Image (tube, rainbow, N blue to C red):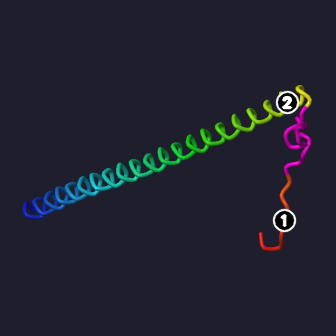
Amino acid sequence: MAAFTTIALATVAAASAYTAYESHEARKDQEAANAKSLAAANEAQAEQEALAASEEKASAQKLKEQQARLVKGTQGRSGLLFGSELGTEENTKATTLGG
């Protein structure tokens, strides 16, 4: 009976050690996955910030051109604004069968 108890205790100890090892490995895998997703999120955020800065720069340039046209118009030169600059043009894209 003592041998059976010893074998049972050894089996429980081995199972506990294996469970602890698996838990440790799972935790390491989860930390690696978290780090990877954080890096991807940071990269996506950086891309969004770059795109926003680019769009802001283009918008500022367009506004500057519109203001220059208005100034020319008040001086008697051709300073007409286009429909898209007045906000009257629809933002629709032509669609084709392929896309």
Q: Position of residue 47 (x, y in %)?
A: 54, 47
Count the labels in the image. 2
Please state, as top left, top right, bottom left or bottom right, where the N terminus lies in the image: bottom left
Along the line of sight, the residue nearer the viewer: 73 or 43: 73
Query: Per the image, is 90 magenta?
Result: yes
Q: Which residue is mark 2?
A: 70
Q: Position of residue 48 (x, y in %)?
A: 58, 44
Name the residue type under label 2.
Answer: Leu
CB-based contact (under 8 Å), mark 1 and mark 2: no
View extreme (bottom): residue: 98
Q: Is residue 32 above or below residue 73?
A: below
Q: Is residue 45 above or below residue 8?
A: above
Q: Is residue 74 left or right of residue 8?
A: right
Along the line of sight, the residue nearer the viewer: 25 or 59: 59
Q: Which residue is mark 1?
A: 95
Please state, as top left, top right, bottom left or bottom right, where the C terminus lies in the image: bottom right
The circle drawn on residue 46 is: none
Q: Quadrant of residue 98?
A: bottom right
View extreme (front): residue: 76
Of circles 1 and 2, which is in front?
2
Query: Per the image, is 12 magenta?
Result: no
View extreme (left): residue: 2
Q: Is residue 21 above or below residue 75?
A: below
For mark 1, give the secondary structure: loop
Along the line of sight, the residue nearer the viewer: 60 or 10: 60
Q: Which residues are magenta?
A: 77-91
Tell me the chief SS of the magenta region.
loop
* Residue occupying image coordinates x 43% and y 48%: 39
